[in-house]
């Protein structure tokens, strides 16, 4: 790090010790990261500089990258480009960089390195490998400053490095990477919707990442700092006043000290005023240089500053020496100057006159235009041109920057640059606007909507397409008007606005005559087929789809033909689950591949995978998913809708097959590279967390999915997780309420309830049946009746959705399995456990769902015990236990062990009795006595007759010398034969 400070570091001993400990662990081969948070001016840079200095003296390679505030535009990977520049400039490190061309290309602009998401991942992996190799030569400290200004691509790369890259623990007993990452950000800049917030929430959950907050200094520490900063003695009243005004902020304190004694007297009320007083103490020439540097940004190269300020070299050097001497600027490596603190730069910049600011921005824009490859400076030039009120040049640079962002795989930055271009469009005279294909306002909006979709911002894509629609004038050609409408329809389907989608697709189809046939009509028809199916108008979908397919074949519009084949495969016969449907889908995949239309190819692959899954052929779906995700990576479409759903389905299959560790690992890998809107794709990991007993954490993550605009899939995923969590807690009321809320939210515009309702109903029924059984045991017949009625209601819902799914046909093996479970729970709630019903449920889940089959087998074992088929019950319990142990499903394991203990099936792992006075069976009876159970209730819970229970109670009274059941329980508590915890868990 280039910054140097003339004052000692005060009040940060604990934080420095902690950071140094992290670095020491990293030097020993345990890679670590610390997120350093604090308000502006609290001392983040000063603390990191201290650590960096110590590290450098200890032989550690220190690499630093800074994020820069460029307003509403971004410069992809800026802090990492700075790091790579330092590596390239160091003759010891440059050969290591040369061995990693993927990372090195980013330094050169990256135009060929990251054309798609696959390239983006290669870049990420290349950067991780570079850091790993550097750490093999010597320990590395990577410092990233001001993450609150980081562009999205930099945030994504940081996420990858910390979650999948260089912080991964070593395996096989080998040492890990000798790397520490310290990244700072302004906590007071993180408003509620700041894009860094979700990333920080993800990173702090990683085992190798910790957070360190730099809190304001204590008053005594600020006083020490004030006295150390000033050479001359300060009056106590002055020190106290500075301490009061600084409020624990070290930078405030130093600036207040520096302003002490300035002309005008007194201490200014705001930090900006303080900073400007210090600036005004400089000569006119130094102030001119400082104002020019402020326009460049936090950091500026000497040559660029020299050309912008236009001073002779000796005058410039004198002014710079003055600014450095007053600690306003810091001289850095490679002939750069940096404002000592971002707030100083902001204050100077804010004090510029409007005309002065515009003139200087224009100077920097023109200078950057003549320096280096144009693509590298496009974002900066766009910023400077916009601030210099040169909209034509800003428009051209914004479009250039958008193209650069697209090439380096930064769709979010591409979107921002395109939106900047759209903001500038009307301010630029028509003659001065860029020309060429696709360069008009409407087409730019369509391009921006595509970038939004690729970045996972579905709702933004809709807004942009609506704006394009508003921009289509009466004199626009009908094909463009139709294209805007069917694009809007497709985007609306993506956000589940189905009625509106149908209306716009209808308009699009009407705007283009069917004769003579045209490709635009074919695509309008293909979109209308999708929209019609979504609103339940299958007749229209079939009629239009068959006609459009014939036209597409005649015109040889191969990709549209493929898209229509996918739609018809879902509409005709038994749909995508049938052999005929899969033949059509395979044909569609081949046609789309030949046409080079990746989105349609992905749609075909997704439907092939779902068709296999819905048929119960889970293993068969995995190759289709792998092929689809690989195709999405190569096409740069990994964040688009079908690949996102494929990632979700892949995790679902892994979860269902019982490959839970693989599921969790894949979910973590996805979270490292997917946009925030892809959060629902990690949902199967929530099911693993629930099954392993992490109820509160999983429920919290599920609720987080419901924040923001309505998302159909996120609502479905959260509904499943929250219903199961409530059922596992035994909260029947909450489980039923969650089912109703979720089903209502997912019911479509035609009133059709979602297919997932059968699963939701079955999950809630587990808790409802438990409540009904408990009510019967306690003799509360009213409650038992109410719960039985709720059970019938939920079972009716399950039957209605399972027997007539969204396609109008019965659901596949998964849906029918959930129905079997729901009906078995209904019987248990209404009349008691039925072995035949649970045997049917166990068989239904044999298609591949290991965990749900085990849960049904546990109920089956309970039913067999009630029917006094003990040997069969013991066999089922053993099978359940084996699955629970293999999966790590702790709550299920506890439940089966409790059943084994209560049913005396043998082989359980329950805790031994604490006394030999009572037998194990009498211990079980005693715990139920403490719960107030009657002999009949004890018999039902322990699967023995009421008469046998009565005998056990009599024996307990005799052994304990008790005259009543109540006295026996009191004696048992006093002598430690039972404990409140044992009673509660019994």
Image (cartoon, rainbow, N blue to C red):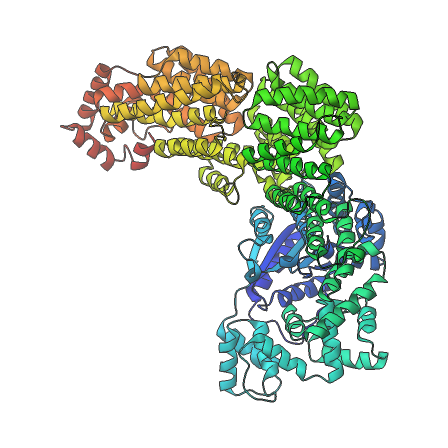
Image x and y of residue 684, in percent: 55, 32
The answer to whether 466 appears left or right of 217 in the picture is: right
Residue 636 as seen in the image, left or right of residue 342:
right
User: Which residue sits furthest left?
Assistant: 963
> In this picture, is 619 found above or below 57?
above
Question: Residue 296 at x, y = what percent?
Answer: 74, 68
- Pick the front one: 305 or 37: 305
- Residue that appears at 79% across and 28% down: 595
Quarter of the view holding residue 185: bottom right
Residue 722, image x and y in percent?
A: 45, 35
Residue 685 visible in image: no
- Residue at 76% x, 21% y is 553
Quadrant (top left, top right, bottom left, bottom right) of the C terminus: top left
Q: Quadrant of the N terminus?
A: bottom right
Residue at 54% of width from left, 86% of height from top?
266
Q: Can the viewer see residue 483?
A: yes
Q: Is residue 439 left or right of residue 959?
A: right
Residue 910, by quadrant, is top left
Residue 775 % position (x, y): 27, 26
701 and 914: which is toward the camera: 701
In the figure, residue 783 lies in which quadrant? Answer: top left
Q: Residue at 55% across / 87% down in the picture? A: 234
Q: In this view, does 23 lie to the left or right of 94?
A: left
Pick the front one: 37 or 537: 537
């Amino acid at each position: 790090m280039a910054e140097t400070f003339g004052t000692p570091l005060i009040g940060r001993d604990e934080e420095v010790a902690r950071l140094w400990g992290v670095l020491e662990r990293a030097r020993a081969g345990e890679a670590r990261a610390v997120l350093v948070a604090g308000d502006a001016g609290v001392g983040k840079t000063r603390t990191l500089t201290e650590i960096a200095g110590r590290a450098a003296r200890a032989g550690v390679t220190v690499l630093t990258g800074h994020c820069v505030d460029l307003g509403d535009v971004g410069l992809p990977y800026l802090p990492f480009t700075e790091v790579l520049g330092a590596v390239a400039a160091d003759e010891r490190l440059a050969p290591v960089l040369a061995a990693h061309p993927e990372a090195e290309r980013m330094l050169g602009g990256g135009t060929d390195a990251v054309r798609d998401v696959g390239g983006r991942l290669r870049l990420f992996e290349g950067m991780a490998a570079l850091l790993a190799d550097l750490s093999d030569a010597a320990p590395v400290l990577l410092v990233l400053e001001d993450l609150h200004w980081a562009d999205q691509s930099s945030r994504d790369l940081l996420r990858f490095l910390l979650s999948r890259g260089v912080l991964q623990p070593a395996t096989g007993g080998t040492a890990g990477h000798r790397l520490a990452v310290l990244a700072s950000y302004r906590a007071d800049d993180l408003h509620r919707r700041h894009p860094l917030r979700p990333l920080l929430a993800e990173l702090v959950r990683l085992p190798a990442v910790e957070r360190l907050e730099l809190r304001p200094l204590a008053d005594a520490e600020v006083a020490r700092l004030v006295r150390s900063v000033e050479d001359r003695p300060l009056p106590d009243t002055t020190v106290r006043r500075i301490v009061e005004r600084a409020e624990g902020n070290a930078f405030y304190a130093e600036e207040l000290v520096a302003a002490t004694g300035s002309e005008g007297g007194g201490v200014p009320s705001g930090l900006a005023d303080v900073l400007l007083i210090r600036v005004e103490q400089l000569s006119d020439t130094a102030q001119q240089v400082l104002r020019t540097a402020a326009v460049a940004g936090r950091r500026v190269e000497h040559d660029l500053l020299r050309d912008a300020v236009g001073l002779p070299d000796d005058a410039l050097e004198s002014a710079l020496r003055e600014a450095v001497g007053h600690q306003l600027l810091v001289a850095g490596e490679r002939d750069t100057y940096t404002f000592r603190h971002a707030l100083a730069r902001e204050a100077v910049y804010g004090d510029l006159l409007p005309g002065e600011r515009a003139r200087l921005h224009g100077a920097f824009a023109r200078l950057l235009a003549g320096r280096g490859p144009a693509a590298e400076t496009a974002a900066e030039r766009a910023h400077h041109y916009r601030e210099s009120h040169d909209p034509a040049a800003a428009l051209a640079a914004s479009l250039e920057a958008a193209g650069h962002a697209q090439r380096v795989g930064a769709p979010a930055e591409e979107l921002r640059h395109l939106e900047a271009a759209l903001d500038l469009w009307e301010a630029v005279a028509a003659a001065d606007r860029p020309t060429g294909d696709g360069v008009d306002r409407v087409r730019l909006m369509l391009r921006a909507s595509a970038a939004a979709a690729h970045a996972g911002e579905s709702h933004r894509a809709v807004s942009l397409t609506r704006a394009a629609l508003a921009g289509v004038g009466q004199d626009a050609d009908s094909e463009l008007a139709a294209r805007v409408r069917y694009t809007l329809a497709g985007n609306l389907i993506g956000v589940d606005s189905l009625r509106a989608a149908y209306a716009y697709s209808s308009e699009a189809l009407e705007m283009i005559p069917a004769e003579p046939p045209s490709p635009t009509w074919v695509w309008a028809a293909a979109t209308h087929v999708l929209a019609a199916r979504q609103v339940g108008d299958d007749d229209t979908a079939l009629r239009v789809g068959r006609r459009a397919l014939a036209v597409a074949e005649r015109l040889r519009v191969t990709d549209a033909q493929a898209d229509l084949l996918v739609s018809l495969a879902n509409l005709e016969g038994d749909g995508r689950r049938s052999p005929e449907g899969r033949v059509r889908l395979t044909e569609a995949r081949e046609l789309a591949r030949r046409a080079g239309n990746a989105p349609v190819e992905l749609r075909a692959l997704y439907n092939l995978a779902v068709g296999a899954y819905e048929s119960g052929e889970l293993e068969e779906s995995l190759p289709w998913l792998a092929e689809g995700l690989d195709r999405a990576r190569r096409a740069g479409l990994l964040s688009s809708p079908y690949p996102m759903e494929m990632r979700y389905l892949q995790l679902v299959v892994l979860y269902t097959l019982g490959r839970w560790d693989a599921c969790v690992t894949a979910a973590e890998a996805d979270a490292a590279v997917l946009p925030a809107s892809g959060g629902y794709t990690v949902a199967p990991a929530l099911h693993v967390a629930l099954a392993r007993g992490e109820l509160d954490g999983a429920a919290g993550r599920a609720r987080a999915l419901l924040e923001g605009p309505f998302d159909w899939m996120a609502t479905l995923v959260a509904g499943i997780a929250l219903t199961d969590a409530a059922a596992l807690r035994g909260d029947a009321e909450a489980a039923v309420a969650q089912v109703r809320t979720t089903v209502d939210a997912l019911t479509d515009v035609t009133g059709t309830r979602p297919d997932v309702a059968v699963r939701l109903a079955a999950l809630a029924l587990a808790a409802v049946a438990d409540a009904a059984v408990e009510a019967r045991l306690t003799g509360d017949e009213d409650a038992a009746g109410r719960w039985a009625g709720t059970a019938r209601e939920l079972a009716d819902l399950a039957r209605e959705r399972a027997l007539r799914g969204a396609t109008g046909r019965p659901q596949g093996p998964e849906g029918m399995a959930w129905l079997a479970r729901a009906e078995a729970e209904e019987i248990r709630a209404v009349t008691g456990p039925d072995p035949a019903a649970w045997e049917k449920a166990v068989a239904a889940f044999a298609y591949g769902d290991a965990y749900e089959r085990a849960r049904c087998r546990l109920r089956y074992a309970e039913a067999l015990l009630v029917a006094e088929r003990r040997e069969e019950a013991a066999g089922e319990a053993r099978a359940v236990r084996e699955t629970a142990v293999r999966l790590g499903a702790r709550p299920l394991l506890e439940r089966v062990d409790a059943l084994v203990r209560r049913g005396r099936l043998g082989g359980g792992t329950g805790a031994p009795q604490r006394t030999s006075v009572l037998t194990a069976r009498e211990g079980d009876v005693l715990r139920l006595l403490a719960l107030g159970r009657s002999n009949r209730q004890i018999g039902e819970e322990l699967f023995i007759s009421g008469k046998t229970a009565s005998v056990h109670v009599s024996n307990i009274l005799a052994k304990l010398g008790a005259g009543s059941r109540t006295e026996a329980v009191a004696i048992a508590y006093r002598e430690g034969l039972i404990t409140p915890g044992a009673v509660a868990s019994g």
